[in-house]
Image (spheres, rainbow, N blue to C red):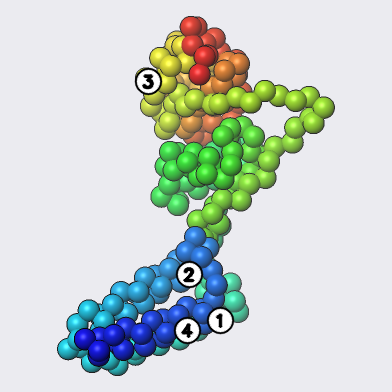
């Protein structure tokens, strides 16, 4: 029991030192290779603690090796843009002047629901407030807000999703009182022949509908809410 206690204390100290050497980043700020190394260190550190028959050095050597590897890779990433792109990838624009960038979403293996959740978690409930949005290599979103007139305050509105990747959200259609026929008329007026061409669409309490096609520029249209609009 005493041996297990001593091994646990020593490994704890070694892991703390290793983490300090690797830097003070939180998990959400880590690059992919840094996160992988951190997870492996956590797993390796548990092996000699859980099994008293495993030699002590079998836990220390991998921890020291992984720490050294992380320091070397970080140095290489600082010195070489090519190495950084290989290890960490590159930032991708997911919302631009045309709306949602469907091509870049596919490259990142993201779907529209993932994007909307990231937009919300970044503090923006309305995607129409965003001029540009970039997913950084650590997974965080950077946003450039759309310019607004500060002399004309606008009421707080909550967008409700109507279409995602060419599919209707029937529950939200009933909730908002918007009909498929009304939306289809607005789509045709703006050059879209079918809902299948829509990547994302939502509507607000004032009847403003935001539509981002899979191809082409986004547009805003007014639609009737019927008996809805009370959310």
Q: Which residue is mark 4?
A: 17
Residue that appears at 54% across and 42% down = 119
- Left/right placement of residue 226 relative to residue 40 reads right
Q: Is residue 84 at least partly visible in the picture?
A: yes
Looking at the image, how many numbered discs can be counted on the residues?
4
Q: Nearer the viewer, residue 36 or 21?
A: 21
Q: Which residue is mark 2?
A: 86
Q: Secondary structure at mark 3?
A: helix
Q: Nearer the viewer, mark 3 or mark 1?
A: 3
Q: Which residue is mark 1?
A: 75
Q: Secondary structure at mark 1?
A: helix
Q: Measure the C-alpha gap from mark 2 to mark 1.
A: 14 Å
Q: Secondary structure at mark 2?
A: helix
Q: Measure the C-alpha gap from mark 2 to mark 3.
A: 43 Å
Tell me which numbered mark, 2 or 1, is placed earlier along the sequence: 1
Tell me which numbered mark, 3 or 4, is placed earlier along the sequence: 4
Q: Is residue 58 above or below residue 215?
A: below
Q: Quadrant of the N terminus?
A: bottom left
Quarter residue 50 falls in:
bottom left
Q: Measure the C-alpha gap from mark 4 to mark 2.
A: 28 Å
Residue that appears at 52% across and 14% down = 230
Tell me which numbered mark, 4 or 2, is placed earlier along the sequence: 4
Residue that appears at 56% across and 45% down = 122
Q: Which residue is mark 3?
A: 171
How busy is the neighbourhood of tag 2: few (under 14 within 10 Å), some, or many (20 plus)?
few
Q: Measure the C-alpha gap from mark 1 to mark 4.
A: 18 Å
Q: Nearer the viewer, mark 4 or mark 2?
A: 4
Residue that appears at 51% across and 65% down = 26
From the top left corner, tell me how far across and down residue 73 is, in percent: 49, 79
Tell me which numbered mark, 1 or 4, is placed earlier along the sequence: 4
């Amino acid at each position: 029991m005493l041996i297990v206690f001593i091994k646990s204390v020593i490994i704890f100290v070694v892991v703390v030192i290793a983490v300090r050497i690797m830097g003070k980043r939180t998990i959400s700020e880590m690059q992919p290779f840094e996160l992988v190394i951190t997870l492996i260190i956590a797993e390796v550190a548990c092996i000699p603690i859980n099994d008293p028959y495993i030699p002590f050095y079998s836990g220390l050597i991998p921890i020291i090796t992984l720490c050294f590897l992380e320091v070397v890779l970080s140095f290489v990433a600082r010195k070489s843009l090519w190495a950084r792109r290989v290890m960490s990838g590159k930032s991708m624009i997911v919302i631009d002047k045309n709306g949602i960038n469907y091509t870049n979403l596919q490259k990142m293996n993201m779907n529209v629901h993932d994007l909307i959740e990231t937009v919300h978690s970044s503090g923006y409930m309305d995607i129409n407030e965003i001029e540009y949005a970039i997913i950084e290599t650590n997974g965080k979103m950077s946003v450039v807000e759309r310019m607004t007139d500060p002399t004309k305050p606008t009421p707080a509105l909550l967008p409700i999703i109507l279409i995602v990747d060419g599919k209707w959200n029937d529950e939200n259609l009933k909730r908002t009182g918007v009909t498929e026929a009304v939306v289809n008329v607005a789509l045709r007026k703006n050059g879209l022949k079918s809902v299948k061409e829509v990547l994302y669409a939502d509507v607000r309490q004032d009847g403003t509908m935001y539509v981002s096609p899979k191809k082409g520029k986004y547009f805003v249209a007014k639609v009737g809410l019927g008996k809805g609009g009370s959310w």
